Each structure stands twice: as structure tokens, then as C-alpha cells.
Image: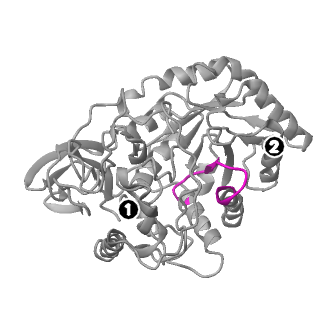
Amino acid sequence: MTDQAARPAHEHRRPSRRRRRTVLGALAGLLLLGLIAGTGLALDSADPARPAGRASGTALPFDLPGRGVLRASPHLVFAHYFPPYPLSLDNRPAARDYYTRNYLAPQGERGKHAAYGGLLRDRPLPVPPSAGDWRLANLEREVRTARDAGLDGFTVDILSLTGPNRQRVDMLLRAAHRVDPGFRIVLMPDMTSLHTDPRTLADQLAEMAASPSAHRLPDGRLVVSPFKAEQYDPAWWSQVVARLREHGVRTALVPVFLDFRANAERFAPVSYAFSSWGNRSYTRQTGVAGDIRLAHSLGRKWMQAVSVQDARPNQGVYDEAGNTATLRSTWNHAISDGADWVQLTTWNDYSEGTQFAPSLHNGHAYLDISSYYLTRFKTGAWPRIVRDTVYVTSRVQFTAAGPGALQSRLMRPRPGTAPPRDQVELLTFLTGPATVSAHVGAGGHTYRAPVGVHAEDLPLGPGRTRAVVRRAGAAVASVTTRFPVRSEVAVQDLQYYAVSSRR
């Protein structure tokens, strides 16, 4: 979802049993097995109380403050949870699960997504099959991962009032309470897919509000944050609030708009706070300060959208994120322009390529980087960098690559987005100045990086990128990308891939 286009309402359908998988599906499974075995991405069989790959906090370039310190802040940070894409859909090994067979494979789901090369380009970081209530266990794992990154909770997309996606909302509320009663779930009815009346919606929200994990303000009001709230007028929402009051539920409405400026004044009387879904290009953030000023002038708080990128094969459109430029820009605007809350958009919408959650192609990199800015947002002070770290981001193909052999419909840049670019970015977090040597394919580059956070852009080239950070002649950090850049591709994939030297 962006301010230009609403996302489709996905409703997962159980996979049909087949006697024979397609050749492409089998190849995808073998490639996935090779990736997991050969590149250090382990199936998460470690301590379930800690996210995969995080070893005693040393994966971050700084020391994340304690949970009590972060939660004492009035500045809250949520991540938008999209129920169609949990860690696993069928509790099978990753090499042959539903993601691999049907969402990543171009001919998956009986060729439904063949025109655009498959529904997804990335997937959740694989987890092993487990016994018992594996759905609940996996949601608990996601809650732990988000909590340990410093997040206060999830804003959960309520796509439907019945069926699998609604069941996942209920289960997420249970998982949050079981893992950490302080982890909050904001109810976010999605008005692009919920075609209902105020009474029915309020009755369903009241059922969800019975969970102790449903987010409430200190005064007890339930936070309801409808996506594309302008789908219905303020009087409609007043009926929702009135019906909830009949259930004994007082409500704080936090509408998320696709067009905030056109709706701010008329929604102000019924709202506690405002938000906008925003956009996903680093060159289009100049209006954030004005949005926040307008919200505050109307006496309302503001929840700022912070994002990584956006690439949608099935909708034929992508935004130019500029490696981590969009991530850094949206966080810096939230910090410098006075946002009250933040919503990471999104935790796990893989169909739009907007995921912060640990994924097959990005590991924990985007979530780790985000934790640095989250600390500043919540505490008012930048954390001290204590471990030299380098993050490398790049695409795995050039933006001008032609149609792949396995698709016919390509993504195009969204009108108004930044110009497409082919670059590798080295984002360094350094305890002191150092020399960085980078090999991008066959090309070599050396530069001096300053203390602190610094982004260096280099031209993209075929092959892998390797970066080494040296100080006083000794290597203090190094990393090699796990996925090579290819000149010829089977499917178009314009997401940025990320890797960290500390994982």
C-alpha cells in the first residue's frame, strides 16, 4: 500500500496436494537448500527466546538499551504486520514448502503468477518444521524478534473478519500476550478490503479488544487505526466508536490516510492521532515536516511511516529506494520533524517487497539498521558505536535488464519516484576513521570512511561485492554479498538485497 495505490487483499488458500511438482519448483527448492547450507543462513533451531543469528547483542554496531529504558519513552515504534505471510504456511521444510513451491516459483499456484515471474521475490527467513501448535509458535518467534529489536508492537492488518487472515490476527494477539504482556498489538482494519457496516466492524473489534495485548492508551482507550480511513467519512467512524462504547470500549481513533492533507481537518474531531501510509522513495520525503506540523496544529499526534523499499511484480510497479537512502531518510524525518509514533511499513508484506522482518535475501540487516535510529527516536540520543560494522546493499540485476525467460510483464518505475540507479552501497558504522576496500565484481575501490555512520555509493557490476574495513593495517570488519549480480536473469527482481558483516 502506498499513497498512490492500495494493496490487494490477499487471502491465503490452502495448497492442493499434487503428485508431481513442476521442474521449476524442484529447482527452486534445490537452490534454496544450497543457499541455506552454503552461505551461513541457518534454519533457526537455536534458543527460541532470541532471534536467529543474534548472539548476545553483538550483531549490532551499538548496545541496544534495555527494554525498560526503551519502553519508558512516549515515542512508540510499531511494525505493520501483514497476516498472509507468516513464517510458514504449511510447516514443511523450506526447500519444498508453500513459499518455495508456489510463491517464489514462476509457475507456482498453477501458473497464476507466471506473467510476472511469480508472486514473491523474497520470503521469511526459513524456520524448521515443529511439533504441536506450530502456527502459534512461529508467531511467538516473530514477536520475540520484533521485541528484541526494540519495537513496542505490531499494527496488524485486519484484512477480513472471517477466515485464515482473521484467525492469524487472533493468534497474534495470543502470541504477544504469551511472549511478552508489554508487547502491544494495534488493531488496523483495512478499509480497502473490509466491505462492512459500522456495527459489524465494531462488534468484531470488540471481540479482539478482549485480548490484553490489544493496545490501549494509559487512560484505557483502545487504539483503532484504520488503513485508508478516508474510505468512509467521519460520521461513519463515529458510529463505529459509538457502537464500541456500547460494548464498554472507549476508543482512540488513529486513521492512516492515503491522502492526509485532503482529510485532516474533517477527521480531526473524531481522531486521537493521524498517520499517512507515505511513499517509498528517498526523494519524496520533503512533505513530512508539513504533515506533522498540520497534525500538531490540529491538536493531534502523528505516527510517521518509515520504510525500506517497495517493489511489486504483480502490480508492475516499483519505487527507487536508493539502497538504504529511503530507510535513513524516513527515519531521520521521524526524528527531526517531531513524530510522536513510528510505523515501519511493513514488517512482512513480501508481495510489495517492503519487509523489515528477517528474510532469506536480507537476513536481519534492515531490522538491525532500524534499531539504531529507533534508539535515537526513543531516547533522544544517538547510541555510541562500539563495534565496527559494514552493511552492503545492492540489487542482483541491472534496472535496464530486459524481460526474463520466465515472465512477460515487467515492473516500471512509479511516476514521481527517484530515477532508477545501479549502485552498490556500503553503509559503515565505525568506531573511528578507517580505510575501506571494496571489490564490486571485477572492479576495485578504496576510500577513507569517517567515524560514525557513512554511506558510500559505488557503481554496480556483475558478480559479488566484497568489502573489508581496515584500521592501522588490521581488518576490523569484512563482508561478502551472498547473491551475485547477473547480467542475464530469469525473472525481474528489483528489490535491494542486504548483508551485514556482523551476522
> Residue at 46% of width from left, 74% of height from top?
44
Q: Nearer the viewer, residue 398 or 334?
A: 398
> Residue at 42% of width from left, 42% of height from top?
315
**Residue 124 seen in the figure:** no
> Residue at 37% of width from left, 33% of height from top?
414
Which label sits on residue 473? none
Q: What residue range appears in magenta?
A: 148-166
Relative to 380, residue 500 above or below: below
Residue under numbered circle 2? 200
- How packed mark 1 is, by other alpha carbons closer than 10 Å (few <14, some 14-19, many 20 or more), is many
Magenta highlight on residue 195: no
Give the mark nearest the N terminus, 1 or 2. Answer: 1
Nearer the camera: disc 1 or disc 2: 1
Q: Is residue 490 left or right of residue 296?
A: left
Q: Could you say where residue 69 lies in the image, as x and y percent from the top left? A: 60, 51
Relative to 161, residue 255 above or below: above
Q: Is residue 427 left or right of residue 76?
A: left
Quarter placement of the C terminus? bottom left
> Residue at 56% of width from left, 40% of height from top?
342
Badges 1 and 2: C-beta atoms under 8 Å apart?
A: no
Label 1: state its secondary structure: loop
Which label sits on residue 107? 1
Label 2: state its secondary structure: helix
- How packed mark 2 is, by other alpha carbons closer than 10 Å (few <14, some 14-19, many 20 or more), is few
